[in-house]
Amino acid sequence: MAVQRSRRRIPEATVARLPVYLRILGEQFDIGVGNMSSEELAELAGVNAAKVRKDLSYLGSYGTRGVGYDVEFLVYQIRRELGLTHDWPVVIVGAGNLGQALAGYNGFGDRGFPVGGIVDIDDAKVGSVVGGVRVRHLDEIKQVVQARNISIGVIATPGAAAQDAADSLVAAGVTSILNFTPTVINVPHGISVGKVDLAVELQILAYHEQRRINAAQGSGVQSLSGLSIPGESRRGASA
Amino acid sequence: MAVQRSRRRIPEATVARLPVYLRILGEQFDIGVGNMSSEELAELAGVNAAKVRKDLSYLGSYGTRGVGYDVEFLVYQIRRELGLTHDWPVVIVGAGNLGQALAGYNGFGDRGFPVGGIVDIDDAKVGSVVGGVRVRHLDEIKQVVQARNISIGVIATPGAAAQDAADSLVAAGVTSILNFTPTVINVPHGISVGKVDLAVELQILAYHEQRRINAAQGSGVQSLSGLSIPGESRRGASA
DNA sequence: CTGGCTTTGTGAAAACGTGCACAAACGTTT
DNA sequence: AAACGTTTGTGCACGTTTTCACAAAGCCAG
C-alpha cells in the first residue's frame, strides 16, 4: 500500500502527547521490549489506555488485537507523522543567560534539533562561542537561516526584544517560532508559534498551593484533589 | 461583605491564562494606563474578547459596563486569586546545565519565585554558588525546604534521576513540582505537577512544519492555516 | 432625565477532548 | 476447527472550553 500522505488532521491535544509516547517507546525499545499494549504504554505515560489507543488510531491501524503494538514500527510511524525522520536545525535569537543555556543544553541536539546558529544584537557577544556555535550578529540572521535551511527559530531575548526577534525571524524565512519570553508576539498568518513561559508554569502551581491553603482553613469540604496530571503546555500553535 | 474564601473553582484553562493577563495589565499600569476594556486586553493577550470577559468573570464582577476594567484593581484581584500576594520560594533539584541556568535566570525571582535553595547529588557541585545561592547536597533537602518553608520544587536533573528527585521533594514536604525533564514522574495524590519539556515543544513545531511540507507537495487544498496563537504552555497542572 | 453609545456579564450553542464499554480481531490451546 | 482469553479500534455519552449574541448597566450630552 502506498504511503498515505497528509492523512487526516491530528488533534492538537494528540500531537502534544505523541512526543511523550515516542520517548517512552524509544526507551523501551532500547531495553529490548519489542511489543507493548496500550495499557502498558498508558501506565508509563501517565494517561488513560483508551486515550493512548485513540491517539494512536489517528496514525493508522498499527496495532494487533490480542497482542499490542510493535514498538519499533510504532516508533517509526510516530517519527514519520511528527516529521522527525530528519533533523530540524534551529536558530536561537539571544545569547544571554537563557540563550546560552539552551545552546548548551544537549537535550536539543540529542532529540533532533541541533543548534544551527545563534545570533545576538550585542556586539560584545558576537564572536563568542556557546554550545560549540559561534554567535553572529542579528543582522546576519538571514544568511544563518538560509545557509542551513533552518525553519525553526527560538526566541531567548529579553521580553522587550521579543517582537523584534520574531520580526527578524520571519523576515529571514523561519516558519515556526518557539518563544521563551513572557511577551506575546504577533506573527503573520501561516507562522506557527509555541510558547514556554517558566513564570506562568510556576504561577499555575502557586494557584494550586493557594487553593490548598484556602481549603485547609476554609470550613468546607476539601474535595479539591491535587492529583498531578502531565500538564502539557497549552500549546498554541496554528489552527 | 467578608472576603469570600474559596470561591467557585476556576477552570484550569482560565488559570493558565490569568498569568498572561496579569503580566499585560502590570505593564500597562506601569506606562500609565488606568483602565482597559476586554477588547484591548484581548488584543494584547492574543485571545478573543469574550474569553477575556468570561475568564475575568470567574474572579468576580470587577468591570464597569460601558467603561472597562480598572487596571490596578484587576491586577490586585488576579494576584490575590493566584496566590501571588507573597513570594513563593522554590527549591531546585539538580545543579547541572539546566539547574544553573534556571538559578541564574532572573525571570524567576522577579516574578515572585526566588530561588530558596539548590541541591545536587554530586559532591563536586556541592558548595559552589550559582545564581547567588550555595548548592547543598540532596540529602539536606529537607532542611532546605523547611528552613524557608518552601512548597514548590523544580526538577532540573537528568531524566533518569527525575523520579528520585520527585520522591525526595515529596518526602521533604514539597506539594507542587515543576518537572523540566522529559520523564513522566509519579507522585502521591494531592501533589500538583507541572511539566515543561523543551523537546516536546519543538517536536510539536516540527509536526506543523511537516504538515506544511506535506500540504505543499500534496495535491490538495491546503486549508491548513498555521496562524499562531499565543500558545500558553499547556500547562500542565493538576486538578 | 431621556436617548444614545459603549462595554460588561452571562445564558446557550457549538466545538473539542476524554473515558467507558464492547464488538471485532487475533493468537493459542485443545 | 472451535473455544477461550486478550487487546485493539471506535461509537457514544459526558465533561470542559470556546464562541456567539444580547440584555443589563453604566457614562455622557443635551
Image (cartoon, coloured by chain):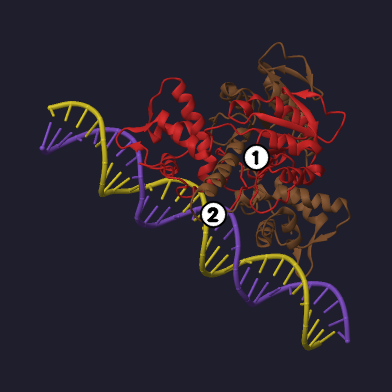
Chain colours: A red, B brown, C yellow, D purple
Give percent across and percent down for residue A69.
Answer: 37, 33
What residue did someone put label 1 on? A151
For the N terminus of chain A, the quadrant is top left
Quadrant of the image occupied by residue C30: top left
Are the residues flagged by discs 2 and 1 in contact, CB closer than 8 Å?
Answer: no
Name the amino acid, label 1.
Ser
Residue B94's place in the image compared with B33, above or below, is above
**Residue B222 circle label:** 2
Residue D18's place in the image compared with A216, above or below, is below
Residue at 70% over, 37% down: A145
Kindly report the distance in space between the C-alpha atoms of the residues bearing marks 2 and 1: 19 Å
Give percent across and percent down for residue B12.
Answer: 60, 48
Q: Is residue A128 left or right of residue D17?
A: right
Name the amino acid, label 2.
Gln
Residue at 68% over, 33% down: B152
* Nearer the observer, C8 or B205: B205
Crowding at mark 2 (Cα within 10 Å: few <14, some 14-19, many 20+): few
